[in-house]
């Protein structure tokens, strides 16, 4: 049976004991991380949130407690009183490795069954087991470090924003379904028969109305929900730092956000960043890197060779350009010998997952130029392609030709894929940049209409408003993303603050006047009574925590995450409801 705590009260945390504590009597409380017996001497590592300390039970320990120490097993909860002394065999691998505690009293506060997973880092247990036994998984030092970093990021965020006159305001979780780009999680109402709430995809509309309400600077560390098919490092519920400001333009928002990011890096990682950060327009990012969240720490930049091959007899190139597309390349400098024909076929298969019909290539060898397309190109075309690529002996040139979107997707993702293959992304540097001037619209081929690139409340560039009717694809927006090491960690825009322009935007997105009133009438109504120019940004809090902890798995920075199928292996959610429960909320299912 577990014993009560009795009169013992914790005086110190195990991981904080140091040489300065030698000779002092301490009381530690925590879990048994490991136990080792050597005849009449028992060694026990006690673990708490701060770390581990070694406790010794020997002939100097009262026999009652020495005998009791023989019963200790992994994950027993114990309280130990003893005296700190210098450790005879120093362990430099842990902060407490120079001291140990000679036990004078022991209480077993609770016993543990044999844990189904080891409570230690790098135990190689499956993710399914980790999520099923999350309470044990969260005891691991690395997991606790991650959540402590997350907690510190909460504090740094609140401190900085409060110091800069931002007001923290909570917005509703139960709201109205509105089209914001993803599928809503729907909640039935018991007291309003046949009606439903939606969980927020973001606080977007509420934070804009707070600006109309005169709060000037708002923030919230907000829970958001999206019922979409999950990819790697996506969760159905996630956290964002939500920010909005009044009487600002793009420069105002970016300026204060750079100070915020600089503060985060200094307080969390003790890294001094230089501001301002570099900027790329969306067009430059796509033309040079093929993606709108580029990692610029390595080369392999895209080069447009459309003018060189637009009249080529190689129809893959010339037809793509004639149909409004392009031909572009990346040069994998000095890596030709690393790629056999079979390896290049694998790159081609990778490219096909992003819409490519194929992938052309040129190897520059010491003796010759090797390429399956050389017979379709004139000597001038081949030489001009190599010159455009700045090609040298040992280079492998990869070429994609298709619609611009496909070419960008293929080469941008190939660029990242190859960089990861050769470990070209340095772990000790941070590449931070802004991407600005995103298109306001993109054309959806399946729906045969324009859709918003960000959301329907993003303001167009003033000089492009004239193209809303004549050429919507030409309109740029006052939108901006902040990108760190090739990951978008935040994004925002200046919002539309004019009711007529907002209605125009809805119209261009195919939302008629009746639907505008049904879905956004409350926002448009508030816009009748004086709207300040306003804009903001939202950061992915989980992704920021991943960045500062160095993990590549979003589940490592969320206490109780879901699986990729949006299930909770710890609690068993979601579950089926009884007929009575469904009846209460006026729902019938058609499941057999």
Image: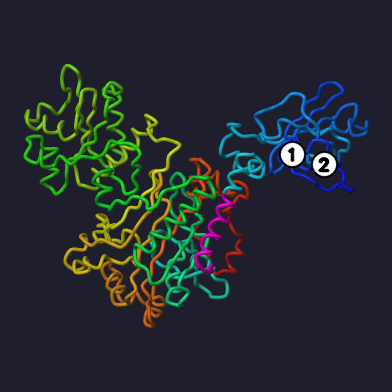
> Of residues 229 and 589, which is closer to you in this image?
229
The image shows residue 25 at horizontal and vertical percentages of: 84, 40
- The residue drawn where x is 75% and y is 38% is 20
* Callouts 2 and 1 close, C-beta under 8 Å: yes
Pointer 1: residues within 10 angstroms few (<14), some, or many (20+)? many
- The residue drawn where x is 35% and y is 52% is 434
Q: Is residue 46 above or below residue 210?
A: above
> Of residues 414 and 99, which is closer to you in this image?
99
Pointer 2: residues within 10 angstroms few (<14), some, or many (20+)? many
Q: Name the image quarter holding residue 204.
A: bottom left
Q: Is residue 6 left or right of residue 452?
A: right
Label 2 belongs to which residue?
26
The magenta region covers 150-169
The image shows residue 406 at horizontal and vertical percentages of: 24, 45
- The residue drawn where x is 58% and y is 54% is 575
- The residue drawn where x is 16% and y is 46% is 325
Q: Is residue 508 above or below residue 361?
A: below
Earlier along the polypeptide chain: callout 2 or callout 1?
A: 1
> Of residues 291 and 588, which is closer to you in this image?
291
Q: Secondary structure at mark 2?
A: strand
State yes or no: residue 551 in magenta: no
Which colour scheme appears in the figure? rainbow
Q: Is residue 388 left or right of residue 28?
A: left
Q: Name the image quarter holding residue 249.
A: bottom left
Q: Name the image quarter holding residue 463.
A: bottom left
Label 1 belongs to which residue?
17
């Amino acid at each position: 049976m577990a014993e009560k705590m009795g009169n013992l009260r914790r005086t110190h945390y195990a991981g904080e004991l140091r040489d300065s504590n030698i000779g002092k009597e301490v009381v530690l409380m925590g879990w048994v991380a490991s136990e080792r017996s050597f005849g009449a001497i028992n060694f026990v590592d006690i673990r708490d949130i701060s770390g581990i300390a070694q406790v010794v039970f020997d002939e100097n320990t009262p026999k009652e407690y020495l005998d009791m120490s023989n019963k200790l097993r992994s994950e027993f909860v114990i309280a130990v009183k003893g005296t700190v002394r210098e450790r005879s065999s120093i362990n430099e691998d842990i902060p407490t490795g120079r001291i140990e505690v000679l036990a004078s009293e022991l209480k077993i506060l609770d016993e543990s069954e044999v844990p189904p997973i080891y409570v230690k880092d790098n135990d190689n247990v499956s993710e399914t087991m980790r999520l099923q036994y999350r309470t044990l998984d969260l005891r691991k030092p690395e997991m606790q470090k991650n959540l402590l970093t997350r907690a510190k990021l909460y504090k740094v965020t609140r401190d900085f924003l409060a110091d800069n006159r931002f007001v923290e305001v909570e917005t509703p979780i139960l709201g109205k379904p509105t089209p914001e780009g993803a599928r809503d999680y729907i909640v039935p109402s018991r007291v309003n028969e046949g009606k439903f709430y939606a969980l927020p995809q973001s606080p977007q509309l509420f934070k804009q109305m707070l600006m109309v309400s005169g709060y000037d600077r708002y923030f919230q560390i907000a829970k958001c929900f999206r019922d979409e098919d999950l990819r790697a490092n996506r969760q159905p519920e996630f956290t964002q730092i939500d920010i909005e400001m009044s009487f600002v333009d793009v420069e105002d928002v970016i300026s204060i956000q750079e100070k915020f990011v600089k503060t985060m890096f200094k307080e969390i990682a003790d890294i001094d960043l230089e501001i301002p950060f570099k900027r790329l327009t969306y067009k430059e990012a796509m033309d040079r890197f093929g993606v709108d969240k580029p990692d610029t720490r390595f080369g392999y930049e895209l080069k447009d060779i459309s003018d060189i091959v637009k009249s080529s007899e190689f129809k893959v190139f010339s037809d793509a350009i004639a149909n409004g597309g392009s031909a572009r390349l990346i040069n994998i400098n000095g890596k030709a010998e690393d790629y056999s024909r079979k390896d290049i076929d694998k790159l081609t298969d990778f490219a096909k997952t992003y819409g490519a019909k194929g992938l052309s290539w040129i190897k520059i060898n010491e003796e010759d130029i090797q390429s399956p397309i050389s017979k379709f190109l004139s000597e001038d075309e081949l030489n001009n392609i190599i010159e455009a690529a700045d090609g040298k002996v040992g280079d492998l040139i990869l070429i994609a030709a298709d619609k611009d979107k496909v070419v960008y997707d293929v080469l941008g993702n190939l660029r990242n894929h190859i960089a990861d293959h050769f470990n070209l992304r340095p772990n000790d540097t941070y590449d931070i940049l802004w991407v600005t001037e995103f298109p306001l619209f993109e054309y959806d081929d399946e729906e045969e209409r324009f859709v918003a690139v960000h959301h329907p409340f993003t303001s167009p560039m003033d000089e492009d408003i004239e193209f809303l009717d004549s050429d919507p694809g030409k309109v740029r927006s006052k939108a901006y993303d902040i990108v760190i090491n090739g990951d978008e960690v935040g994004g925002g825009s200046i919002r539309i603050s004019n009711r007529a322009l907002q209605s125009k935007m809805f119209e261009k997105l195919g939302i008629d006047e009746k639907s505008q009133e049904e879905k956004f009438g409350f926002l448009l109504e508030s816009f009748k009574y004086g709207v300040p120019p306003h804009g903001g940004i939202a950061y992915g809090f989980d992704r920021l925590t991943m960045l500062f902890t160095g993990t590549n798995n979003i589940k490592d920075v969320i206490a109780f995450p879901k699986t990729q199928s949006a299930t909770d292996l710890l609690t068993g959610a979601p579950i089926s409801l009884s007929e009575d429960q469904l009846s209460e909320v006026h729902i019938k299912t058609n499941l057999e």
